[in-house]
Amino acid sequence: QLQLQESGPGLVKPSETLSLTCTVSGGSISSSNYYWGWIRQPPGKGLEWIGSIYYSGSTYYNPSLKSRVTISVDTSKNQFSLKLNSATAADTAVYYCARDWLNYDILTGYYKLPWAFDIWGQGTMVTVSS
Amino acid sequence: QSALTQPPSASGSPGQSVTISCTGTSSDVGGYNYVSWYQQHPGKAPKLMISEVTKRPSGVPDRFSGSKSGNTASLTVSGLQAEDEADYYCTSYAGSNNLIFGGGTKLTVL
């Protein structure tokens, strides 16, 4: 059974880089059928999509975070990672990693993302504070 | 891109039906059939309940159903049960490889 696990520092200083890793177990991150994403949730607030990556390295980012975000993949370790530069208190949140999948569209002959996450990690709390 | 609009709260008694709305624009909800719904219990990760407007993943009770009309998507929970009490979030593809979330609705089972 596929599982995702986030890891990384729980405390980051303002202006520094927030770095997290998601380890995929029970399956291969190199499967051509999936994208892998990061989503965050500030305390007491709603969810926000940060970005997603394919095993080939192709990425999609939330436009509001794009200038500060880098998502990368390490297929040899079955992991993908998030880096968020110039962190501020507003970046304090629970960070989740999750899996999206590709559907084959018989009408167009292309694979398409449903933009839905079916498997999630348990989440990791990151606080940005001095 | 603005967040999708959801009512902050909804409620119903056990056995009743409740519908949660998710309003966007023609650039997101109205423009694509990529609306999803998530259930989140306190301190837990979200759980996918509906994808692509109406599709229910394996293991999700058929009491949960999704629909869309114009720029508004809806999640209906029929035969409310105590364990349905949770926060519910909608999402929609917004074009240009961008995904947006709703603000969330707290469902209370009275």
Image (tube, rainbow, N blue to C red):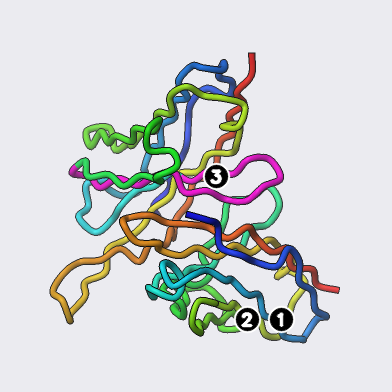
Image mark 2: chain:
B
Q: Name which quarter of the figure residue B74 lies in.
A: bottom right
Res. B18 mark: 1
Res. A123 mark: none
Badge nearest the viewer, 3 or 2: 2
Identity, as a three-letter code, of the amino acid under mark 2: Thr
Q: Residue at x 52, y 69 (%)?
A: B24
Res. B76 mark: 2
In three-dimensional space, the C-alpha distance between marks 3 and 1, rounded to whole angstroms, equals 28 Å
Q: Quadrant of the C terminus of chain A?
A: top right
Residue B14, how many percent across, how many down? 80, 81
Q: Quadrant of the N terminus of chain A?
A: bottom left
Q: Element type at marker 2? A: strand
Q: Residue at x 27, y 63 (%)?
A: A102
In three-dimensional space, the C-alpha distance between marks 3 and 2, rounded to whole angstroms, equals 26 Å
Badge nearest the viewer, 3 or 1: 1
Label 3 close to label 1 by CB (< 8 Å):
no
Marks 2 and 1 belong to one chain: yes
Query: Which span is picked out in magenta?
Result: A39-56
**Extreme-left residue of the structure:** A109
Image mark 3: chain:
A
Label 2 close to label 1 by CB (< 8 Å):
yes
